[in-house]
Image (spheres, rainbow, N blue to C red):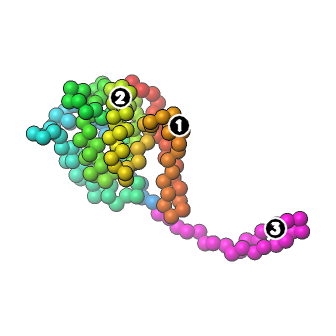
Amino acid sequence: YVLVFTGKDSEVKTIAKKEPQKVSVTIKAVGDNLIHSPIFKACRTEDGFDFDGLYTHITPYIEEADIAAINQETIFVDDTQTFTGYPAFGTPTAVGESVANAGFNLITHATNHTYDRGYNAMLYTMNFWKQYDHITVLGIHESPEKQQEITVWEKDGLKIAMLNFTYGLN
């Protein structure tokens, strides 16, 4: 029990003490989903691209996590002429589709490659992720105001603040 003293007359109130609640959160993270040109060339199909095979063996582990994070190192582009590897990456959106299919629900995008294809590619990438309501994207923002907002994930009263930064842009 907790005793609470209130007012000038030191009135005492007794409040029942709550037992601490155990909360379990499983976080699994994969880092640097860095798509070099030999990878997207190997995943080319007659209809476009299929990157699902890159994630097949980790999907069961990702599915069991509360927070399944991946650092999407490279930015997405929609023009096949701008699909490039090192040093200035431009990645097919089919990679994002496969990441979503694998079960990731947290994408970190603040990397030194975020601006490799310029502002429009960054906007294109942000807009691409909007089709996935269950995925949280960190590190790229539509405005300075959105950049100042801190994403907070909550489970059973436990709150986890999520931030994503990079040291610089290429």
Quarter of the figure with residue 96: top left
| Mark 3 lies on residue | 5
Residue found 46% across the figure and 40% down from its top: 164
Any magenta on residue 23?
A: yes
Alpha-carbon span between mark 1 and mark 3: 42 Å
Nearest to N terminus: mark 1 or mark 3: 3
Q: Residue at x 25, y 47 (%)?
A: 98
Q: Secondary structure at mark 1?
A: helix
Q: Are marks 1 and 2 in contact (CB under 8 Å)?
A: no
Label 3: few (<14), some (14–19) or many (≥20) C-alpha neighbours in 10 Å: few
Provide the residue span drawn in magenta: 1-24
Q: Is residue 20 magenta?
A: yes
Q: Using residue 120 as the reference point, say whether residue 9 is left or right of it.
A: right
Query: Helix, strand or loop at disc 3?
Result: strand
Give, as a three-letter code, the residue at label 2. Asn
Look at mark 1 in the image and give the residue it sits on.
145
CA gap, disc 2 and disc 3 = 59 Å
- At label 3, the amino acid type is Phe
